[in-house]
Structures are given as C-alpha cells and as structure tokens.
Image: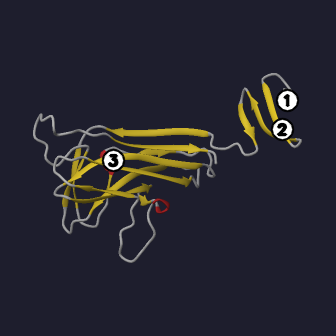
C-alpha cells in the first residue's frame, strides 16, 4: 500500500500497481463490475388484451419497458424483473425478453425443430391465480444508441385467448381473494 499523493491510495503486488483509489473513483487491473446506470419501470395497474395463437403480446404496449442509452458499447446490460399474469382458461404462459421489438436471442433456449424458444414460463391453474414469471439476461450493449427492453408473453392454446396483467381472469368486484400484482423490469449497465 502506498500513498503517493493526497486523496490517493495505491495497491501493488509483485512490483505492479493493481488498484488505485482516488477521490474520482477506483481504477486498476481486474477491477470490474462498476455499475454505470440503473433504469427501471413498474406497472401496478391492470390491463387485458386478446392474444392470437402463436403471437407474442409485448408489455411495452401496456406501459412496461425501459429505454436505455448505454455509456459504452462494450459494457454489459443486466435485464431482470417479473411479470404477474393470468389467461383465460388454464394453461401455459411463456415469456420472452425483447430488444427494440425483436426477440433477445441470447436469452432464449436453443432452436430444436418446431419447439418455441422462450426465456421462462409458468402455468396458470385458475381464474383467480396471478402467475408470477421471473426473467433475467446479461447481454453486451453493442452500441451507444438508445435501446428499448420489454417482455412479451404467449400462450399454448390453438385459439385467441384473453391475457390479464396484474390480475386474475375472474375479478369479482371488491373481493379480498381477487389479487393485484406488480410487474417490473430493470436494466443495469455495468463495466465488465
């Protein structure tokens, strides 16, 4: 440990400086993970929409998304959160993360025949149940242009179904057993 000047501490091993702490921050070899910015969005109200078989309903349409302008193209973005959903009738509800309206391919399973590629999923087993589906991914920013991240959901039915955000499909007025959820997305930019 050395103190070469006011407001500065330096650490060395084997005669090589490894870390420097100044009043401007921390620098050095192997020092990473510095958070550059965190943006988030939370949807606490409810929404419902009809979703055709084989289509993906984007939550950006209903007010849940994050626009981020990365500071460096080489930085990493951690995208994470949860959605609270229900669908008309029982069945699977699957989730994907999207970037600028396109599927985030680094956050889905491998291609395998006709199987749907998803980030995560859940099973809606009742009309009053709110299925909470978590999601997360880490990607390289790739540019310093603004990027929009949101999530999309799809169902396993062969026909159109009504999807519900932050509520069950059965929503008897003022009933203590008809719940309200909160859906959220966070995007964190950090130096690798």
Among the two numbered marks 2 and 3 on one chain, the one whose residue lies closer to the N terminus: 2
The image quarter containing residue 26 is top right
Nearer to us in this view, 125 or 95:
125
Label 3 SS: strand
Query: Is disc 2 surrounded by few (<14), some (14 to 19) or many (20+) residues within 10 Å?
Result: few
Q: Is residue 24 above or below residue 59?
A: above
Tag of residue 29: none
Mark 1 or mark 3, which is nearer the start of the sequence? 1
Q: Which residue is mark 1?
A: 2
Residue pointed to by mark 3: 83
Residue 156, visible in the rendered structure: yes
Location of residue 51 (image quadrant):
bottom left
Q: Which is in the foreground here, disc 3 or disc 1? A: 1
Q: Is 35 in front, or is 92?
A: 92
The residue that disc 2 covers is 12
Contact, mark 1 vs mark 2 (Cβ under 8 Å): yes
Residue at 75% in and 31% down: 21
Secondary-structure class at tag 2: strand
* Quarter occupied by residue 99: bottom left
Q: Is residue 68 left or right of residue 29?
A: left
CA separation in Å, label 1 and label 2? 8 Å
Q: Badge 1: few (under 14), some or many (20 or more) residues near its Cα, within 10 Å?
A: few
Question: Which residue occupies 79% across, 27% down?
Answer: 8
The residue shown at (70%, 42%) is: 31
**How far apart in space, not on screen, are marks 3 and 1 (Cα)?**
50 Å
Whichever of callouts 1 and 2 sits on the residue coming sooner in the sequence is 1
Q: Position of residue 82 (x, y in %)?
A: 37, 46
Residue 146 seen in the figure? no
Residue placed at 45% from the left, 47% from the top?
80
Direction from residue 146 to residue 126 in the image, left or right:
left
Residue 96 percent across, percent down from the top left: 38, 58
């Amino acid at each position: 440990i050395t103190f070469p000047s006011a407001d500065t501490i330096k650490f060395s091993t084997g005669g090589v400086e490894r870390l420097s702490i100044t009043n401007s921050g921390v620098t050095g070899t192997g020092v990473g993970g510095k958070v550059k910015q965190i943006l988030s969005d939370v949807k606490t109200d409810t929404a419902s929409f009809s979703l055709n078989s084989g289509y993906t309903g984007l939550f950006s349409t209903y007010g849940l998304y994050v626009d981020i302008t990365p500071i460096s193209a080489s930085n990493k973005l951690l995208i994470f959160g949860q959605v609270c959903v229900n669908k008309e009738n029982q069945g699977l509800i699957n989730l994907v993360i999207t970037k600028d309206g396109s599927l985030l391919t680094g956050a889905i399973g491998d291609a395998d025949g006709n199987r749907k590629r998803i980030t995560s999923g859940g099973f809606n087993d009742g009309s009053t149940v709110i299925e909470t589906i978590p999601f997360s991914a880490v990607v390289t920013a790739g540019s310093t242009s603004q990027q929009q991240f949101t999530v999309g959901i799809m169902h396993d039915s062969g026909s159109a179904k009504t999807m519900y955000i932050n509520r069950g499909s059965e929503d008897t007025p003022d009933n203590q057993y008809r719940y309200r959820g909160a859906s959220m997305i966070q995007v964190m930019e950090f130096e690798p």
